[in-house]
Image (cartoon, grey):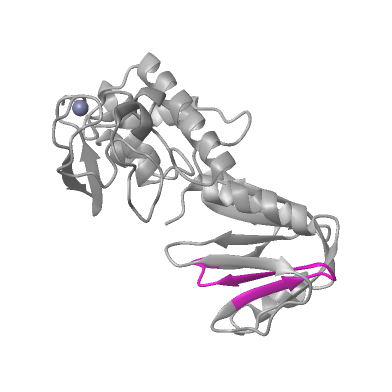
């Protein structure tokens, strides 16, 4: 599933392509026909990402809400939109640009109170300026749940996925199964800052790189990582490979149906 940086990049791109313009919207597949009719012919005011949720705000007062989920994908281009191929849930166009959305988990029109309710149920997004990490810590420090699960809970922290969470915990030297109750205030402040730093860098580059300069392939004289996720990381999907810091084999385990990765030496229980 795309992590928050991907959604923030989409918000920026869609704003550049469409903000301020009257857009034509339809649903070639038909499943979003009613919603498309509400939006078509109205002006797209702006866009916003909150965690893994994308919002397009319209001058008419309503908003388009998209959650890509596991399979959702956007495509866009210049000029006339191509003939729809496959299951195109939403198609948007102006004279200059087009956009297509396939396979999302959510694609719906929300009223302002519904947008407010969505924001309300999401935790702090490290990529949103002014995000307040204190309510998140209030929940983390009272919970016996493993930190990795707490940080993946979108009602506590929004936008974080498995890569950012496992990598930030490695960088903090913290075992992913350590309980929330054991995280100090200073520990949370550092973790929050680091998540923000890693995620902001990913917004710029479009990939997740988490290794410090001294652990880059060039610095270590090792081959670069080969993985469809791209990016240089410490532990994510590196089970059995040597830790870039201490050489210990990276461990893999399961937590609420998700794979976890950690270095048993650098991240003691
Ligand atoms: Zn290590």
Depth check: 25 or 197 in front? 197
Give the quarter of the figure containing the C terminus: top left
- Residue 108 makes an appearance in the image: yes
Residue at point 37%, 39% (across, down): 232
Look at the picture and state if 109 lies above or below 83.
above
Residue at point 30%, 22% (across, down): 183
Q: Taking the image as four quarters, which one is ligand 1 found in? A: top left
Q: Position of residue 103 (x, y in %)?
A: 50, 72
Q: Position of residue 129 (x, y in %)?
A: 63, 31
Residue at point 83%, 57% (across, down): 59
- Residue 124 makes an appearance in the image: no
Quadrant position of residue 140: top left
Query: Is 268 situated left or right of 140 in this image?
Result: left
Query: Is 20 situated left or right of 55 in this image?
Result: right
Q: Is residue 97 magenta?
A: yes
Give the quarter of the figure containing the N terminus: bottom left
Query: Is 147 situated left or right of 194 in this image?
Result: left
| Majority secondary structure in the magenta region | strand
Q: Is residue 178 magenta?
A: no
Residue at point 54%, 50% (across, down): 6
Quadrant position of residue 151: top left
Query: Is 78 situated left or right of 189 in this image?
Result: right
Look at the picture and state if 196 lies above or below 90.
above
Q: Position of residue 261 (x, y in %)?
A: 23, 41
Q: Position of residue 178 (x, y in %)?
A: 22, 29
User: For the magenta stretch, what is the residue range?
Assistant: 89-106
């Amino acid at each position: 599933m795309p992590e928050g940086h991907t959604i923030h990049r989409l918000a920026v791109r869609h704003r550049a392509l469409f903000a301020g313009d009257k857009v034509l919207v339809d649903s070639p597949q038909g499943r979003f026909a009613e919603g498309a009719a509400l939006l078509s012919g109205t002006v797209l005011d702006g866009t916003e990402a909150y965690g893994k949720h994308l919002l397009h705000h319209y001058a008419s007062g309503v908003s388009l809400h998209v959650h890509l989920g596991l399979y959702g994908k956007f495509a866009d281009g210049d000029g006339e939109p191509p003939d729809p191929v496959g299951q195109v849930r939403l198609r948007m166009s102006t004279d200059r640009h087009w956009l297509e959305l396939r396979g999302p988990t959510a694609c719906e029109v929300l009223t302002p109170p519904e947008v407010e309710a969505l924001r309300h149920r999401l935790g702090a997004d490290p990529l949103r300026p002014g995000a307040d990490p204190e309510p998140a810590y209030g929940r983390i420090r009272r919970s016996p749940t493993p930190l990795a699960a707490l940080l993946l809970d979108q009602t506590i922290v929004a936008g974080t996925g498995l890569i950012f969470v496992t990598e930030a915990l490695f960088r903090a030297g913290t075992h992913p199964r350590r309980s929330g109750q054991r995280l100090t205030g200073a520990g949370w402040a550092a973790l929050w800052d680091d998540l923000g730093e890693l995620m902001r860098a990913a917004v710029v580059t479009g990939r997740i790189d988490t290794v410090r300069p001294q652990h880059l392939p060039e610095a270590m004289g090792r081959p670069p990582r080969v993985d469809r996720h791209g990016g240089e990381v410490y532990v994510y999907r590196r089970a059995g490979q040597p830790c870039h810091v201490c050489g210990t084999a990276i461990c893999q385990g399961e937590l609420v149906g998700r794979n976890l990765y950690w270095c048993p030496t650098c991240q003691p229980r």
